[in-house]
Each structure stands twice: as C-alpha cells, then as structure tokens.
Amino acid sequence: MTEHKKPTSTGVSVRIKHRVRQDAMEWYEHWLARTIDVAAQFPGHQGVNILKPVGGHNQYDIAVRFSSQAEAQAWLGSQERATLIAQAREHLELPENVEISTGIDNWFQPLNPSIKQPTRWKQWLLTTLVIWVLTMLVPPVLAPLFSQVPLLGLWGVRHAITAAIIVALVIYLIMPRLVRRVSGWLFR
C-alpha cells in the first residue's frame, strides 16, 4: 500500500475503485501520480492511500481524504478531475466506483476490501475506552472555567460544553490516530 499523507486528521474519505486494462497499467501509474498531485492542491486535502493490485490483478483501491464533505465534493465535481477521468476512461475496464465515507464509518473502514470490517464488540470496546478516559479528564480540566464564568457552569450548559469537547476530541483527534495504531488487533 502506498500512502501520501499530510500531517492532519480525518474527516471524509473518497474511496475510488479503478479496474485498469492490463495493457494500460504503466500509463495508469503515471496518470495516478498526476492525479494525486492535482488533488493535493485542493482545499481540505489530507492525503491519499493507494492499494495497488498484485498477482496479475488489475484493481486499484484509492482513498483520498478531505477535511469536510464540501471539500470532497469540490474535488469530485471539479473540472480538473473531470478532465483527468476523461483521459483515463479508455484505459479502464469498467466505469470507476466512487463512495464517500464519513464520521464513525470512516474510523472502522478498512482500505483493503479483502479485510473484513472489525467486529462490533471491538468497535464498542475501543470507543467506550476512549470516552471513559475523556469523561474522567475533561470535566476537571474545565472546572476552573466553570468556576470563573458562572453562566457556563450552570447545569445543562456545563454538560453541553463538556460533551461537545469530548465528541470533538474523539472524532477529530483521538479515533483517527488510535484506530491506525491498533489496526493489527482491530481488523484481526
């Protein structure tokens, strides 16, 4: 697997499958390198993972990450991408398959289609552990703020702020990194 990555966390993955004609594999490799360079210039681009075919197979699985759905859609609907796809069309055996995955689906989605989705209990355990730790750490960190600004410390308001911070940490910071680190166990 080839990875081209910028140092940021995830939001949306555009998953693309191309089945390339056998006689066009070398041409496609050059085209794919150009396409990666063009995609990298778009706002919100966070990197690309490429699963190249092996053993005589001809399907490329590509995941292009963007920080938001709107930025992913901007790339997918761009004139630059339309031009690139028009160039590649005659070299593909089938029309491309494009899917967009976001949020929690994106955390537990293996790039390689031959790897099965992790079992629900592993997803539950990992998510519970992260939230459990954060619910012990975040409230005491916010306590001084709630003491200094009584309006923010009101029942309900305090909980909304705490929940929003925990969810943001889980979605944008912790889970994307943690899933990569425990992928050996998670996808087993």
Image (cartoon, rainbow, N blue to C red):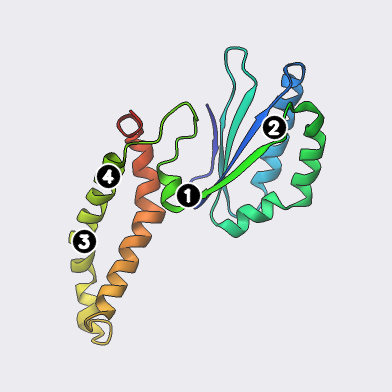
Asked if disc 4 and disc 1 are in contact, CB closer than 8 Å, the reply is no
Q: Residue at x 48, y 45 (%)?
A: 7
- Please state the total of marks drawn on the protein image: 4
Say whether disc 3 or disc 1 marks the residue closer to the N-terminus: 1
- CA distance separating discs 3 and 4: 14 Å
Q: Which mark is residue 126?
A: 4
Say whether disc 1 or disc 2 marks the residue closer to the N-terminus: 1
Asked if disc 3 and disc 1 are in contact, CB closer than 8 Å, the reply is no
Taking 82 as reference, is 36 left or right? left
Check disc 1 and give the amino acid type. Thr
Say whether disc 3 or disc 4 marks the residue closer to the N-terminus: 4
Q: Which residue is mark 3?
A: 135
Q: Which residue is mark 2?
A: 32
- CA distance separating discs 1 and 2: 22 Å
Residue 30, can we see it?
Answer: yes
Check disc 2 and give the amino acid type. Leu
Say whether disc 4 or disc 1 marks the residue closer to the N-terminus: 1
Q: Element under label 2? A: helix
